[in-house]
Image: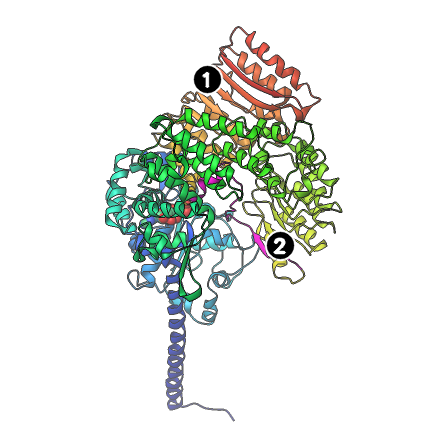
Amino acid sequence: MSTSYDSQHISDFRQKSQQFLCVRFVLEHDVLQKILESHKDDMKAKTGRVFEGKKENKIHISKVYTELFITEGDITNVYDEHEVLKIDRALKKPKFEDTPIDCNSIFCLLKQKKEGNIVLTKGIAGIGKTFSVHKLILDWAEGKANQHVDCVFLLPFREINLIKDDKEISLHELLLEFYPDLKEVENTKFYEEYKLAFIFDGLDESRLELDFDCKLVKCVNARSSVDVLFTNLVRGKLLPSALIWVTSRPAAANLIPPEYVGLFTEVRGFTDHQKEEYFRKRIVDEAQASKIISHIRTSRSLYIMCHIPVFCWITASVLQDILLLSSNKGMILKLAKLAFEQLKEENVMFYETDLKACGIDESEESTGLCTEIFKKDSVLHEVKVYYFIHLSVQEFLAALHVFLCYLKLDMDELKFFLENSRPNKKELLYVLLRKAIDKAKESDRGHFDLFLRFLLGISLQSNQKLLIGLLDETLENKNCINKTIQYIKQLQNNDKCPDKSINHFFCILELQDRTLYQQIMKYLKSESGQPKAVSNSNCSALVYVLLMSGEVLDDFDPKMFNKTYNISHRLRELDLSGNDLQDSGLHKLLDEMKNTERKLEVLRKVLMKFSINHSCEIVSSAPQSSNSVLRELDLSNNDLQDSGVKLLSDGLKSPNCQLEILRLSGCMVTEEGCGYLSSALSANPSHLRELDLSYNHPAQSGVQLLKHKLDHPKYKLEKLKYGKCKYTSTHTSTQTPTYTHLCIFNYVVGQLFSTLALKIHLTAEYSSKPNLAGCNLTAQDCEIVSSALQSSNCVLRELDLSNNDLQDSGVKLLSDGVKSPNCQLQILRFVRFDLGYHKCSELCLDKLPPLQSSNCVLRELDLSNNDLQDSGVKLLSDGVKSPNCQLQILRFVRFDLGYHKCSELSRCLHFLPFLILSSPNCKIKSIFMCLFVV
Ligand SMILES: Nc1ncnc2c1ncn2[C@@H]1O[C@H](COP(=O)(O)OP(=O)(O)OP(=O)(O)O)[C@@H](O)[C@H]1O
């Protein structure tokens, strides 16, 4: 029997199925709306708060966001202009005549275009591309703009890079990686019926290899590599109705073929009006904002630079801190008095009455600055006691107070030191310092020691400059400083107590006396030639003094730590940061340590470039040795590479290895190196707790191998640093005591000298002598420097590139710059620019500025501390002999002969002056050579 449907049946069925579809649609719609609402909340959280340098500085974007000048640009220019020229142009001629466009309107403008599928926005580093992206998304999520768009996805290339290169993934899955909540849209018509916008931020950071002729992908569920998905979106093959926005720095903008670009925009930064608006918005205190704006106006170059928003931020941070210091001046002075009064009494804890006696009342004690400097406790009977956050803060403030009293000639306050003496004004500082030295010497417990060091530090004019805002004037009194140094030295001759003697070393260090080394040697060698007894605490102080002095290490004899003076067994930590100790020196040192019952737990060798094979072998053998107690090893910023890491990993595998912390930041480690480390950890899982691989180049899979170890209970690994997270080295500075209080300055100033700032600094018109020493510049950065040198309006006259790891390729680029007829460079410094560790010195030197070139106008060249070797020196002398060479001063001070004991080098070096001076063309007036034969 066949079923027959009459028309009534059919109509009922239609009605029901329509109802069913409606119900399904309503349900689906509800689900989607919920997902979209939660996505919007997610986006608000993601884009609403912005980092401003430090984590704790996370603020809401609306508090700082200032409209930017964005224009519609000509896409064809993208393909023929170099980024440096763009920066240059942007800095010199920030013209804002074109019609600005509102960032929120870009999607509407795109729709008006007949051709092209995407919006491409370019802009130089720090100009505000990411900020614009965040603002657009936030406005959309808050319902303020672009409400025709149902859903916006932010996909920064920086994060896309984290997806495995070879992973096949669908667009839907890609979105799930970023937005897991979208899981539920899978079976809906989300991708077909909703208006979607995709924002790809920072094309310049992308590691994708873009091939716009690649295979077609049209379906959101079809799998392929991420680059194929991206190119299909851009070509309009995948989700053709979606809106796509890509941002990029200029150099990478040309990766997208122009035919796909519907709207091309350029972020041009802040106009003058916007700059000022930014400062007023960011700095809530109106008077402070006005002060900063007027300060910026007085400096033309700063004012121009501030059209780049990131500079506005840096400027605001630096200037605000300086103002903060002066606006808190009154309070700081009261605290300084309090600190001194209490120090005199040897008090570290004090009461409300003590605060009042120094003019600090109850209302002030728990506000502003006080809360940062004080700690407050209620002890017995609810009586409040106060103490400075750290004793050194009290000691520093006390020293500041005494120095201020000296400036004000407040003899009453200085009575504590001067007692009955009444020196004249000229002698006052010397007498005051001398008496303070005596006071510290008299104190058995040494409670004036650090105070004294701060006071001596502040008495140097160079340090006083750091206290602008607190001191009304700075004073240069070299005569007094010299007399003080002499006085301390005199005391040292009769020093009976080692503790006092060490403090005297520190005092001399604080006064930046260069003869410190001899003083130390004198201390170490008693008259009988026998070592003096050195206490535990003095041992580390002594090592500190020894190692902090660059001069000392030229003559560094590791035996001193060991047999002769028998102090190495007390050594716990050895920081060789920034020293010249070569491989051979390190070898000797570790060798000595091996033979004793040593307790060296922490070895740091940061910033010391050294050869791969030698040093890694040395370092690898140290943790393997059976009596090794090495716990921390910091080899950051050395060119270890994977081969070095392999050697090191052999050490780690040893059951004797107790290493807990290993820092290999910036050591050119790739995925291969991660593999070695991973297998070393597998072989010996029990110790390593912290591994720093930041600033290296491991592919994601390399990191994954190690990350796995983080989760597994078998391993102790707790911390793994990778990517571009900044590792703050614990590298100490000779001036630590005096600068402790200024760490906030250092932070901001550090920001100011970021590579980005320096790049722009370099191309800015005002700067003819940028100091780029120790700025972590790389070979790539040399491209910028080289272009600057070749530019027709280059004003660079003097360039210091010391202590940068520029590598051969970088030197080559620089050399191209110096050869350019436009280049006016007269002075070039490459001090301790370790050419040596490439072990191909001829090559390197070959790439140094060509002294023979008729365009080269170099007058001064400083190659100190480079391992040029014989052949290098020969090349150099050939250059200098050339009739074109203009060189007048050539330095290679502290050339380390010990390293090449058996080579021809010494002979060659002795010959060099002769070779050069006997040449009829030679214009050299002085040669600085300082030879140390070990
Ligand atoms: N519109 C703005 N309002 C206020 N501050 C801004 C604005 N744009 C940028 N800034 C400031 O400049 C800094 C850098 O901006 P942003 O990260 O957007 O630059 P970018 O062009 O994306 O740079 P890069 O190419 O280096 O990624 C921000 O952290 C912020 O401090």
As helix, strand or loop, the secondary structure at mark 1 comes to loop
CA gap, disc 2 to disc 1? 52 Å
> Within 8 Å of ligand 1, the CB of disc 2?
no
734 inside magenta stretch:
yes
625 inside magenta stretch:
no
Q: Nearer the viewer, residue 489 or 810?
A: 489
Identify the amino acid type marked 1: Arg
> Where 173 sits versus 720, above or below?
below
As helix, strand or loop, the secondary structure at mark 2 comes to loop
The stretch of residues the image draws in magenta is 715-743
Q: Position of residue 498 (x, y in %)?
A: 60, 37
What is the chief secondary structure element of the magenta stretch?
loop
Identify the amino acid type marked 2: Arg
Q: Which residue is mark 1?
A: 859
Q: Residue at x 25, y 40 (%)?
A: 96
Q: Position of residue 856 (x, y in %)?
A: 46, 18
Residue 465, visible in the rendered structure: yes
Marking on residue 689: 2
